[in-house]
Image (cartoon, grey):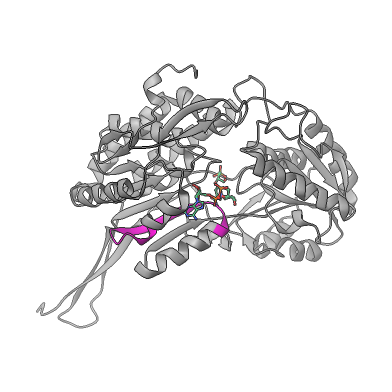
């Protein structure tokens, strides 16, 4: 049993229209570290999902009529409760997702920071006054909430990926129906417990756990009362959702897959680059959308970098995320392990060498040994697909032009990183990388104050920052005639 200060945060019922309901069915949630059953959670179907959407639709008028300051106060209270309960929320998150407790607590505070940020932005949704085009005309532009937002989110950051969406949505006056990943619904339900305590009105925030992602997703995409879909997950599912939203022309925000290049130039601080690679690659056991997926190292520093990185990786403590000092927790499931194995096998078959790791961990279960591969080439699966596991593939390169071309050889464009000190090179490479976000001499770029998002097939729109409300607003142009 999970040791919580407030056991009421381990909620297994769905939250719809301000009511907690167990529905007719349940589905199990297991701990990926131990395989143990954590809880059986309400398994809502299409009818209940429709009811949640109806509840959000009914609630949207009054919520939008509240002032930004009134909505801000509610979000601020929610933020304060999320922080106050961070330890319990982190334990729930680690239990259902597996990441080390320190990372889970970091995610809770990161997620809360979006609620805090958009509590502030709620008061600053400005319009425009535009000089009239004719003497008797006066032009005003106002911004209004889009309406009901449907949200579908992944298991790897089960708190922050919802917070990054529900924060701006509620701030501007939208209402929200969240369908969390089937592996990790408990974090979303705990957020709903605290939202209710914070005074979020009934129907404004709804959580619809379900084991049938495709069926519930179809309802959310097709329902005409839903005005917008915000999705975080794989590019493959993002494409499905785009097709399903076409008949009703829904607005969409998509935070999709990545294949981040991580480049170490010969003028880099190699020790700093190793630490940057550790965080950019192995955070959440590599199960992060902005993880370094390809590590390019210029020849002159290749041997030093690979030796230092391998030594750090070989020393990682692997185990249950609830255990103090663990750096690498379990992968989410067998499919994740198999994909990681397949990428390593493909690389080895094409000439790569395993510097450390390279196989399932001796702990068994969902644990995988943190891995460094050398001698990588562009023909390998790892170069072209998102591994989403604790594998650091090293590619050697000679020139700046060569590595920029290699880095951009991907249909993905979420994040990219490089370590260098020549300011002219830094500007050249930062401007040329075909990504939405660039980390220079750092492996950790995620923050609520900056616009998070990608280009190419990594998504549409931005989350966080002053730009984060735009995706939840409609612009209305009002023309006053006859003014003389
Ligand atoms: N860009 C970002 O901010 C970001 C953040 C986290 C994860 N991701 C990406 O997400 C992927 C890993 O997460 P995942 O395995 O949960 O991705 P996924 O696309 O398999 O699942 C994401 C969510 O969509 C649901 N889903 C799956 N099939 C669906 C369907 N047909 N219709 C409706 N919903 C469906 C899942 O149940 C889950 O809740 C990686 O590609 C990663 O890069 C991106
Ligand atoms: O998986 C990617 C998420 O966006 C996590 S983070 O925002 O990079 O921390």
**Quadrant of residue 270 within the rendered picture:** top right
Q: Nearer the viewer, residue 290 or 202?
A: 202
Placement of 3 over or under 252, stated as above or below: above
**Quadrant of residue 473 within the rendered picture:** bottom left
Place of residue 119 in the rendered image (x, y in percent of width and height, measured from the top left) = 34, 41
Residue at 49 percent across and 39 percent down: it is: 158
* Range drawn in magenta: 221-236
Placement of 437 over or under 7, stated as above or below: below
Q: In which quarter of the image is the C terminus?
A: bottom left
195 relative position to 292: left or right: left
| In the image, residue 449 lies in the stretch drawn in magenta | no
Q: How many numbered callouts?
A: 0
Place of residue 93 in the rendered image (x, y in percent of width and height, measured from the top left) = 51, 30
63 relative position to 282: left or right: left
Q: Is residue 368 visible?
A: yes
Place of residue 183 in the rendered image (x, y in percent of width and height, measured from the top left) = 52, 38
136 relative position to 104: left or right: left
Residue at 29 percent across and 62 percent down: it is: 224
Q: Nearer the viewer, residue 137 or 325?
A: 325
Place of residue 272 in the rendered image (x, y in percent of width and height, measured from the top left) = 75, 39
Placement of 31 over or under 270, stated as above or below: above
Q: Residue furthest bottom?
A: 134
Q: Is residue 267 visible?
A: no
| In the image, residue 223 lies in the stretch drawn in magenta | yes
């Amino acid at each position: 049993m999970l040791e919580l200060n407030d056991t009421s945060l381990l909620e297994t019922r769905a939250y719809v229209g301000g009511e907690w309901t167990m529905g007719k069915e349940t589905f199990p949630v297991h701990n990926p570290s131990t395989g143990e059953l954590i809880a059986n959670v309400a398994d809502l179907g299409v009818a209940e999902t429709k009811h949640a959407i109806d509840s959000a639709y009914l609630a949207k008028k009054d919520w939008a009529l509240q002032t930004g300051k009134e909505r801000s106060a509610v979000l601020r209270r929610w933020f304060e409760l999320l922080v106050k309960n961070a330890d319990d929320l982190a334990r729930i998150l680690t239990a259902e997702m597996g990441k080390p407790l320190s990372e889970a607590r970091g995610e809770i505070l990161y997620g809360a920071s979006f609620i805090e940020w958009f509590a502030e932005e709620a008061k600053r949704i400005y319009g425009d006054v535009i000089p009239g085009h004719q003497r008797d005309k006066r032009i005003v532009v106002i911004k209004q909430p889009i309406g009901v937002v449907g949200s579908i989110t992944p298991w790897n950051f089960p708190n922050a990926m919802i917070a990054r969406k529900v924060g701006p949505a509620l701030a501007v006056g939208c209402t929200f129906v969240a369908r969390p990943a089937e592996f990790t619904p408990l974090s979303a339900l705990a957020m709903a417990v605290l939202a209710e305590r914070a005074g979020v009105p009934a129907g404004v925030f709804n959580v619809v756990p379900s084991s049938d992602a495709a069926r519930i997703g179809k309802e959310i995409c097709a329902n005409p009362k839903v005005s917008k879909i915000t999705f975080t997950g794989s590019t493959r599912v993002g494409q499905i959702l785009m097709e399903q939203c076409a008949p009703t022309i829904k607005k969409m925000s998509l935070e999709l897959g990545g294949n981040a290049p991580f480049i170490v130039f010969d003028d880099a601080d190699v020790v700093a680059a190793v630490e940057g690679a550790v965080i950019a690659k192995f955070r959440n056991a590599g199960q992060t959308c902005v993880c370094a997926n390809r590590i390019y190292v210029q020849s002159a520093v290749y041997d030093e970098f690979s030796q230092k990185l391998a030594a750090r990786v070989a020393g990682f403590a692997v185990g249950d995320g609830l255990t103090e000092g663990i750096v690498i927790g379990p992968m989410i499931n067998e499919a994740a392990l198999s994909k990681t194995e397949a990428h390593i096998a493909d690389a080895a078959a094409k000439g790569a060498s395993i510097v450390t790791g390279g196989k399932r961990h001796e702990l068994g279960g969902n644990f995988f040994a943190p891995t460094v591969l050398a001698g990588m080439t562009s023909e390998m699966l790892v170069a072209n697909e998102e591994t989403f596991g604790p594998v650091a593939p090293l590619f050697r390169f000679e020139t700046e032009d060569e590595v920029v071309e290699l880095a951009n050889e991907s249909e993905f464009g979420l994040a990219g990183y490089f370590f260098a000190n020549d300011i002219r090179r830094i500007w050249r490479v930062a401007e040329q990388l075909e990504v939405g976000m660039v980390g220079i001499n750092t492996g950790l770029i995620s923050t609520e104050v900056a616009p998070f998002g990608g280009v190419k097939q990594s998504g549409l729109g931005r989350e966080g920052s002053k730009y984060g409300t735009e995706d939840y607003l409609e612009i209305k142009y009002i023309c006053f005639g006859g003014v003389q």
